[in-house]
Structure formats: C-alpha cells, structure tokens
Amino acid sequence: SKEYSARYAALINSAAQKLDDKAKVYTVVVPLAYAYNDKVLKKTDATDPKAAIDSIYGAITHPNARKVDAYGALGAHKNEYLYFRTDHHWTATGAYYAYVALADSLGYTPYPMSDFTPMTVCDRFMGTTQASSGMTWIPGEALTLLRYDGDEDFRTEIISGGQTVRTLNGFYD
C-alpha cells in the first residue's frame, strides 16, 4: 500500500541519516511474482510493480541510501524459474539474481552461478498461495537450494530479544 511504502521509505531515510558517518545503507525492494507476468498485468487491475518500486525509491532521498535494482536484475531473466508457482516467494534462482544486483551495488564481484550446486530438499513443495486458494489439485514443485562449497563452515545465529535462540551450522539446517 502507499502507506506502507511511505513508512518504508521514511525508515530507510532515517537509518541512512543515523548511520551517515558510520555505514552506507542499502535497500532492495523485491518485485512481486506477478511483476513479469504480462497476462496477469493485462487482465487485472494490479498495481504496476515497476511504478510502485520507482515510487518507493523516489521517496528515499537521503544521499547515504543506496537503492538496488532488483526489478531490472530479475527482469533480465524473467523467462527463468524465478518465483514459485504455488507461493509468492522467489526461488533460489530469483534470489541469486538479486544477490548479483546487490553485489554490483556494493562494488564486489558476485560468485558466478556455476560456483553453486543446486540441492533439492523437497520435490513436492506447496506454498501459501496454493494453500490459501484451496487448489489442492495443483502439483507441488521442487524446493531447491543453491549450495556454495564451504557454506557449512559458516555459523548462523537466530537472535530474538537480544538472545540467541538457535544456532545453525551453515546457511541451511
């Protein structure tokens, strides 16, 4: 909504101001799954996703805030499997292209896709879109991670209320 978009932009501007001398602030507004589906865009009154993102980024005015173009990065690969059919989230492939856009903004060279090994952890994933629609006849789909050699050497901590509530070895449990 316009209200949430304005609140988000204000939050980013505030963070950029508070961190001005300490760190740069990067923001990635991720397009929704229908953003590249011409049929949906033509047949519904859905908000123009590019215009919505441009509006949010236009309201982020602090010079310390860096805006990452995930819309363009994903759009360059719109014919690939970027979003789940049964869910509103992106796939690991979609997330990879946003990572590339972020890496470019940060000024470092992203790892090439060929450095990652796909690992399917579920072949019948049924996302929230399918569950909320009641269309249980739609077949599930593969849930695939992109593993990087050595990613198990990282430690991930989940922190809530200032306390570590869970620690994972690697990025995935």
Image: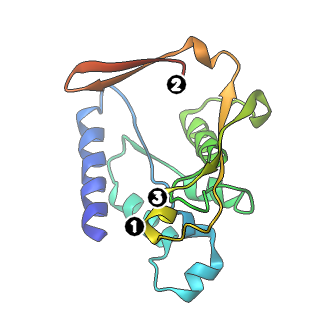
Instruction: Name the residue beneath numbered marker 3.
Output: 128
**Is residue 147 visible in the rendered structure shown here?**
yes
Q: How much space separates mark 3 and mark 1, taking CA atoms?
A: 28 Å
Toward the right, the furthest residue is 114
Quadrant for residue 60, please give it.
bottom left
Mark 3 or 1, which is nearer the eye? 3
Report whether 46 appears left or right of 1. right
Q: Cα distance, mark 2 to mark 3?
A: 21 Å
Measuring from the top left, give residue 163's x and y in whole percent: 23, 19
Q: Secondary structure at mark 3?
A: helix
Element carrying mark 1: helix
Q: Quadrant of residue 99?
A: top right
Residue 39, percent from left and from top: 64, 81
Residue 148 in the image: state x and y as whole percent. 68, 24
Residue sitting at 24 percent across and 67 percent down? 3
Q: Earlier in the sequence, mark 3 or mark 1?
A: 1
The quarter in which the N terminus is drawn is: bottom left
Seen in the picture, residue 120 relative to 147 is either above or below; the reply is below
Disc number placed over residue 55 in the picture, else none: 1
Amino acid type at circle 2 is: Asp
Three-letter amino acid code of the residue under disc 3: Thr
User: Relative to 144, does residue 94 appear above or below in the rendering?
Assistant: below
Taking the image as shown, residue 130 lies to the left or right of residue 1, namely right
As helix, strand or loop, the secondary structure at mark 2 comes to loop
Looking at the image, residue 56 lies above or below residue 73: below
